[in-house]
């Protein structure tokens, strides 16, 4: 088969035919998928599609025109390829009349795709995004199509529509073409869609990989340090190579600058961290950033406080308010605490209690935070999450310098998971806090029991070995000296019992 066998229809003739109106299309019910010559249709399509795959758009154009004109219901891929061809032509065109004609063709391709293959909401979403990308002078056309897509498909729209649509909307608001109310209503609807998809991920989850300035340092198996550990968070997934096939690491613990992940890291020390996030989470982050100027905490409070006060038992309304307040980082507001408490009375839920406890913790109301974390534990069925809550409670107790509470919560975590090495590290850290209460020889002997806890930590949990080893190296330097012990008849290797808290017995060791 040579290209000379392909019937050629010029773009001008095609446009004239299409502009005549619906009569220029074959009726859907009468459409013959293969056209009048099935062999010629298949040959034209195959050559055209191959050319598109290799970006040979000029060569693809003839075959595409044949299939589009003679077999419009042959395959939906014809329309996908057509957008690639004419999008390429549009971007290369310099003169305005030619660009307008090509944009008209793109519109007609989308319209005919809907006519023969349906999926109106899905196609209008793609259509609208194409117009936003191509027709910068007329953003309202693309906006209107995406708005129709949202009305038709709701929660099933594609994630890549959310940010371009909302970004354009905020730009139009700045030009006084759209109102602040339009922005707030759109944010509310889009956030509901994003939240639904985060909570109900599909079988195919799209990922995004985003470079950072962070690097891993002092790597030891699956523990490393970072000077900017505050930029990281537990549960964060990252890779050390910007590729979709690279190993993923999940952060399981952050202790000051020490970070522990779920498996040994195979890349070298000094590797750059790349965040790996699901597409809907990225959409929500970008949506929140764009909406930030419109969604300060006082604005949200002024909008939703009257609504909540008028309907204080409406669970759906409460969920919406909490979602928006969380997204806008307004968890330290009176409205957040009021709505959370009301919601949890009607809907006791571990996650809800955990979020509320985090808010009290951020407000440094530690006694209330501990109380609510305990409710999270009481309503939790996942043992791993219970352990994490107890570890968080242990850290709060450590901040409060309440050493007995540290031991209590750490022991509760260990009762569920005896291999939670971080619990032993926190106990060791609390013994450090208690060191000031030890006098004379015990003022240095207490470092024996401190280091004992760090040794236990790495013995039960190799993943935390890096953090444990760094502490061991630091505090072993404060062990008692042999000459001082000699006069007290304390010998290396013997057992010694502290006379101060935590009053533990330990093995005698001396600093070199």
Image (cartoon, helix red, strand yellow):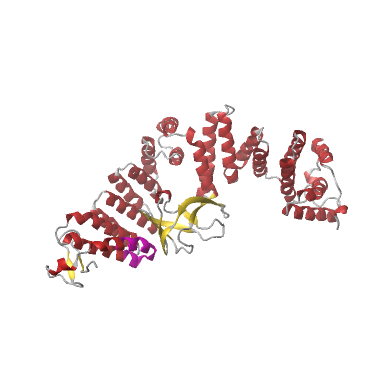
Magenta stretch holds residue 460: yes
Residue at 48% of width from left, 64% of height from top? Answer: 266
119 magenta-colored = no
Does residue 348 appear in this view?
no
Residue 51, percent across and down? 76, 53
Q: Quadrant of residue 29?
A: top right
- What secondary structure prevails in the magenta region? helix
| Residue 228 shows up from this direction | yes
Residue 463, x across and y down, in percent: 39, 63
Position of residue 485 relative to residue 119, above or below, is below
Q: Nearer the viewer, residue 384 or 306?
A: 384
Percent coordinates x, y for residue 141 in the rendering: 66, 34
344 versus 394 height, above or below: above
The structure residue drawn at horizontal position 50% and vertical position 59%, both measured from the top left corner, is 248
Q: Which quadrant would residue 154 be assigned to in this image?
A: top right
Looking at the rendered image, the quarter that the C terminus falls into is: bottom left
- Farthest residue to the top: give it: 176
Horizontally, is 377 left or right of 60 in the view?
A: left
* The N terminus: image quadrant: bottom right
Is 105 drawn above or below residue 229 in the view shown? Answer: above
Q: Nearer the viewer, residue 305 or 441?
A: 441
Q: Which residues are magenta?
A: 456-472
Q: How many marks?
A: 0
Q: Position of residue 482 (x, y in %)?
A: 18, 68
Left or right, 186 with respect to 72, comes to left
**Observer-nearest of 10 and 67:** 10
């Amino acid at each position: 088969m040579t290209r000379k066998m392909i019937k050629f229809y010029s773009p001008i003739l095609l446009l004239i035919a299409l502009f005549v109106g619906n009569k220029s299309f074959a009726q859907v019910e009468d459409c013959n998928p293969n056209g009048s010559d099935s062999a010629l249709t298949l040959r034209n399509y195959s050559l055209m599609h191959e050319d598109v795959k290799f970006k040979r758009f000029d060569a693809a154009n003839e075959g595409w025109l044949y299939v589009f004109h003679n077999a419009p219901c042959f395959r939906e891929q014809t329309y996908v390829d057509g957008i690639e061809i004419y999008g390429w032509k549009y971007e290369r065109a310099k003169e305005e009349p030619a660009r307008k004609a090509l944009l008209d063709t793109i519109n007609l391709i989308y319209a005919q795709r809907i006519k023969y293959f349906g999926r109106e909401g899905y196609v209008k979403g793609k259509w609208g995004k194409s117009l936003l990308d191509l027709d910068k002078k007329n953003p309202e056309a693309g906006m209107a199509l995406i708005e129709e897509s949202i009305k038709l498909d709701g929660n099933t729209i594609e994630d890549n529509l959310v940010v371009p649509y909302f970004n354009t909307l905020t730009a139009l608001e700045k030009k006084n073409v759209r109102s602040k109310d339009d922005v707030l209503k759109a944010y509310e609807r889009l956030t509901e869609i994003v939240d639904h998809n985060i909570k109900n991920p599909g079988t195919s989850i799209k990922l995004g990989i985003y470079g950072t300035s962070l690097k891993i340092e002092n790597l030891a198996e699956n523990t490393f340090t970072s000077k900017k550990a505050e930029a990281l968070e537990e549960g964060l997934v990252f890779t050390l190579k910007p590729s979709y096939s690279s190993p993923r690491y999940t952060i399981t613990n952050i202790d000051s600058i020490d970070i522990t992940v779920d498996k040994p890291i195979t890349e070298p020390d000094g590797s750059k961290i790349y965040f790996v996030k699901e597409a809907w989470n990225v959409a929500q982050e970008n949506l929140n950033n764009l909406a930030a100027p419109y969604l300060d905490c006082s604005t949200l409070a002024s909008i939703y406080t009257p609504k909540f006060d008028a309907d204080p038992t409406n669970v759906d309304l409460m969920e919406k308010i909490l979602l928006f307040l969380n997204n806008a980082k307004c968890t330290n507001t009176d409205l957040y605490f009021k709505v959370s408490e009301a919601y949890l009375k009607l809907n006791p839920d571990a996650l809800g209690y955990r979020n509320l406890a985090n808010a009290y913790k951020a407000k440094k109301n530690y006694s209330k935070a501990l109380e609510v974390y305990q409710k999270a534990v009481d309503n939790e069925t996942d043992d791993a999450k219970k352990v994490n809550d107890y570890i968080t409670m242990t850290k709060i107790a450590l901040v409060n310098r309440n050493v007995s509470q540290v031991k209590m919560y750490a022991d509760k975590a260990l009762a569920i998971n005896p291999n939670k090495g971080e619990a032993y590290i926190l106990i060791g850290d609390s013994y450090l806090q208690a060191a000031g209460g030890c006098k004379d020889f015990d003022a240095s002997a207490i470092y024996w029991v401190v280091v004992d806890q760090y040794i236990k930590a790495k013995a039960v949990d190799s993943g935390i070995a890096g953090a444990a080893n760094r502490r061991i190296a630091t505090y072993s330097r404060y062990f008692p000296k042999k000459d001082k012990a000699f006069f007290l008849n304390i010998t290396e290797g013997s057992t010694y019992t502290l006379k101060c808290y935590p009053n533990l017995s330990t093995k005698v060791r001396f600093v070199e």
